[in-house]
Image (cartoon, rainbow, N blue to C red):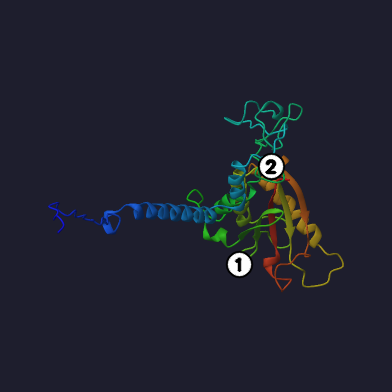
Amino acid sequence: MGAQSNAAPIIIKKKRVSGGDGHHGGAWKVAYADFVTAMMAFFMLMWLLNATTEKQRKGLADYFSPTIPVNPSSGGGDGAFGGNNMFSEQTLVMDGRGATSLKPTIAKEARGSTGVDSDGGGDHSTEEFTSLEAHLLGRTGESAVSDKLLKHIITRVTDEGLVVEMFDTEDQPLFESASDKPTDMMRALTLLVARSSDLVTNAVAVEGHVRSEPLVLARNPSWDLSSSRARVVRQMLQNKGVPAERFDRIAGHADRELVTENPMEPRNNRIEIIFLRTP
């Protein structure tokens, strides 16, 4: 008969730990934080795409790109913080076209650019035209434009520049009948344009248009009348403070560019003042 062992049996107790489940773990919090961060970055990107123009987006991309064009002939500004020197060959290296010691700048024309535009220069005409339009049409608090004036003026931006069109109405002409003598309304409109022109430095063109005559005349006065009215408006603008060197073109188009189906409507009697885009 075998001997009986008095040794106690060995008992192994296994305990399951579930610390990663439910609210007892933190791995899901890290994943959630990464997801929220990614979503915030995504929405910021979408907001930037919607709130910026194509030119601004290209500028942002060029800021992080080492391929910004470098040209030793840059535009050094002639104002405060505009550059080390007002001459382009002695200022910060950029890609704009500016003044040189042989041809210094006038009217703050040499400010250069930062490589945003493919044509090598910064064009802010659209923004400046928008500001000028707002001032002419009474959209700013600084401009007290009456409703009577607003009935005779419209603006539009074209490839040539900002066109300010002033025209006759049925009850209020801008010039006395068949003459180039301006009425009080025309004088008020001209004063408004002259005061607003200080917002930009663009060259100015003045063009005259008249309606067709009801009868076929041996000598059509439309050419002389439209040209004469354009010259009168140019002189009025100059008298109100627009420098003579800003005028680039004065022209009369007679009745060749009508804006209504009825060629004899007073609406065709108009003056167009064009703030030309900078070349």
Looking at the image, residue 34 lies above or below residue 213: above
Give the number of the mark in front: 2 or 1.
2
Horizontally, is 111 left or right of 145 in the view? right
- Distance Cα–Cα, label 2 vs label 1: 47 Å
Residue that label 2 marks: 121
Residue, far front = 1
Q: In the rendering, which numbered label is found on residue 171?
A: 1
* Residue located at (75% from left, 46% from top): 248
Disc 2 crowd rating (10 Å Cα; few below 14, some 14-19, many 20+) is many
**Residue 50 rendering spot, x and y as whole percentages:** 53, 56
**Residue 23 rendering spot, x and y as whole percentages:** 27, 57
Looking at the image, residue 126 lies above or below residue 120: below
Horizontally, is 43 left or right of 100 in the view? left
- Figure quadrant of the N terminus: bottom left
Which element carries disc 1, helix, strand or loop? loop
Horizontally, is 156 left or right of 3 in the view? right
Callout 2, which amino acid? Gly
- Figure quadrant of the C terminus: top right
